């Protein structure tokens, strides 16, 4: 497949640096995990692997097939497809037919500041056979442009509400970056009145035309838009908490970057779990769980790092001086999470990510960002919170009221709109 060679050579160790590597003696919870032939991990082994987690991170031996120097989250997929092609070739010589599975992905809001670079990155994935780009305008040019890239995914454009059902037909994964971006002085809550309605309408279409698809919500405020999506799916009778995700991967990406810079470590070695929500103080990086084990000289340094991670979105908004928000890094993070989901769908037994999901992990918070194990049906397991530092425990208590208010705001919005349309 031409795209495989392209990705290996062009991406190499430069693109998507840092985030996707196993540690010596441990399993990375980031999306690029080591290639494991499908079906090689049976249920008892998977259970043992889950039990071996230490806090927020797995402690299992490194696979011999892992390349520690690798930095591209596509390289795991590439190695698996090469393995699959060799299997298929051998089967073909024996007169057998073996299908190499690929998936259909829809990006809703594909012409926007996040949607365009995100669509490019998804187009590069060897696991994607069809890429459906939807927006209310200007999406045909994006699709035409992307269709010239010599990667296998077939690109189609869909414009406006009348074409939305066709955009969603038979898709396996729906990614929703639609909505307005943040501007200077704006909080994520300022976006609520516009983006809440956009997400509600798009998820309602997903519920009708792709009820079994995984749904990745990027549209802010995620703390509220994911609960809105859940209520819409419930109303349609198709809500599956294992298949609905708020994409908080950008918080992990930022945490990894800032910690590596502060500690003068290689980016590819650093892994920071981030829990809670996706706005301000609800973003809680667990710096006591950084891998490799990291010593911070004082609580002041921990507080400074935590605050920067929490306010990183504002840092970008102010730097762009009214010209936009964090579009490129968000697209990167969303593509990473999409690739993780597709690898899990494809049978990779070792995919872990942090994501905002329906959860009973924290009392009174029906949605919470946690480290989860992804599988063929979506979320397979939510990892428990264990051994938080005193600083993290205080921060967790402090975020609860704000996150609870955001969740309730989303649920109330969805129920009011449902009652008005009844």
Image (cartoon, helix red, strand yellow):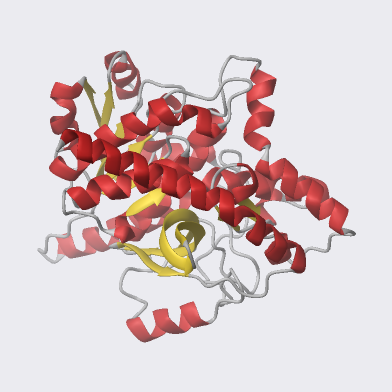
Q: How far across and down, in percent of the image, does residue 58 sit?
A: 56, 72
Quadrant in which the C terminus is drawn: top left
Residue 194 appears in the rendering: yes
Q: Write the residue at 48% across / 37% down.
A: 221
Height in image: 163 above or below 293?
A: above
Q: Write the residue at 61% across / 76% down.
A: 54
Q: Is residue 202 left or right of residue 355?
A: left
Quadrant in which the N terminus is drawn: top left
Q: How far across and down, in percent of the image, does residue 27 sit?
A: 56, 69
> Outermost residue toward the left?
95
Q: Write the residue at 68% across / 70% down.
A: 388
Q: Is residue 390 left or right of residue 281?
A: right
- Pick the residue in front: 164 or 277: 277
Q: How far across and down, in percent of the image, does residue 341 sit?
A: 37, 53
> Outermost residue toward the right?
297
Q: Is residue 264 left or right of residue 306?
A: right
- Pick the residue in front: 98 or 163: 163
Q: Is residue 260 left or right of residue 366?
A: right
- Pick the residue in front: 238 or 120: 238
Residue 127 appears in the rendering: no
User: Which of the 4 image quadrants contains residue 155?
Assistant: top left
Q: Write the residue at 15% across / 24% down.
A: 163
Q: How far across and down, in percent of the image, does residue 383 sit?
A: 50, 70
User: Which of the 4 image quadrants contains residue 343?
Assistant: bottom left
Tally of numbered tags: 0
């Amino acid at each position: 497949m031409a795209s495989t060679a392209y990705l290996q050579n062009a991406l190499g160790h430069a693109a998507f640096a840092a985030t996707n590597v196993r540690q010596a003696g441990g399993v990375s919870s980031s999306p690029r995990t080591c290639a494991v032939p499908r079906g090689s991990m049976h249920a008892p082994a998977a259970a043992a692997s889950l039990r071996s987690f230490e806090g927020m991170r797995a402690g299992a031996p490194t696979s011999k097939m892992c390349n520690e120097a690798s930095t591209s989250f596509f390289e795991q997929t590439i190695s698996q497809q090469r393995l699959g092609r060799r299997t298929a070739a051998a089967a073909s010589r024996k007169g057998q037919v073996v299908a190499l599975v690929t998936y259909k992905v829809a990006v809703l809001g594909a012409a926007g500041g996040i949607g365009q670079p995100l669509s490019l990155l998804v187009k590069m994935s060897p696991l994607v056979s069809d890429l459906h780009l939807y927006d209310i305008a200007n999406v045909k040019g994006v699709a035409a442009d992307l269709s010239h890239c010599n990667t296998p995914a077939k690109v189609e454009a869909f414009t406006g509400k009348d074409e939305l059902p066709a955009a969603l037909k038979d898709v396996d994964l729906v990614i929703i970056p639609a909505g307005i971006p943040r501007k200077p002085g704006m909080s994520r809550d300022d976006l609520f009145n516009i983006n809440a309605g956009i997400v509600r309408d798009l998820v309602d279409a997903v519920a009708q035309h792709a009820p079994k698809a995984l749904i990745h919500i990027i549209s802010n405020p995620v703390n509220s838009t994911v609960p809105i999506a859940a209520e819409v799916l419930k109303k349609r009778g198709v809500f599956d908490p294992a298949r609905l995700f708020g994409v908080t991967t950008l918080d992990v990406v930022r945490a990894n970057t800032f910690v590596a810079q502060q500690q003068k470590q290689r980016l590819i070695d650093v892994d920071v779990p981030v829990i809670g929500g996706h706005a301000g103080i609800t973003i809680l990086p667990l710096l006591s769980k950084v891998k490799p084990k990291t010593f911070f000289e004082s609580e002041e340094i921990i507080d400074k790092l935590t605050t920067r991670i929490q306010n990183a979105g504002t840092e970008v908004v102010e730097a762009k001086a009214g010209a936009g928000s964090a579009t490129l890094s968000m697209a990167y993070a969303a593509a990473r999470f999409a690739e993780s989901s597709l690898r899990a769908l494809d049978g990779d037994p070792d995919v872990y990510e942090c994501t905002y999901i329906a959860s009973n992990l924290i009392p009174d918070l029906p949605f919470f960002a946690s480290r989860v194990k992804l599988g063929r049906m979506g979320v397979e397991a939510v990892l428990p919170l264990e051994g938080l530092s005193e600083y993290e425990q205080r921060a967790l208590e402090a975020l609860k009221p704000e996150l609870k208010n955001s969740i309730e705001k989303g649920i109330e919005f969805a129920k009011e709109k449902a009652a008005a349309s009844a």
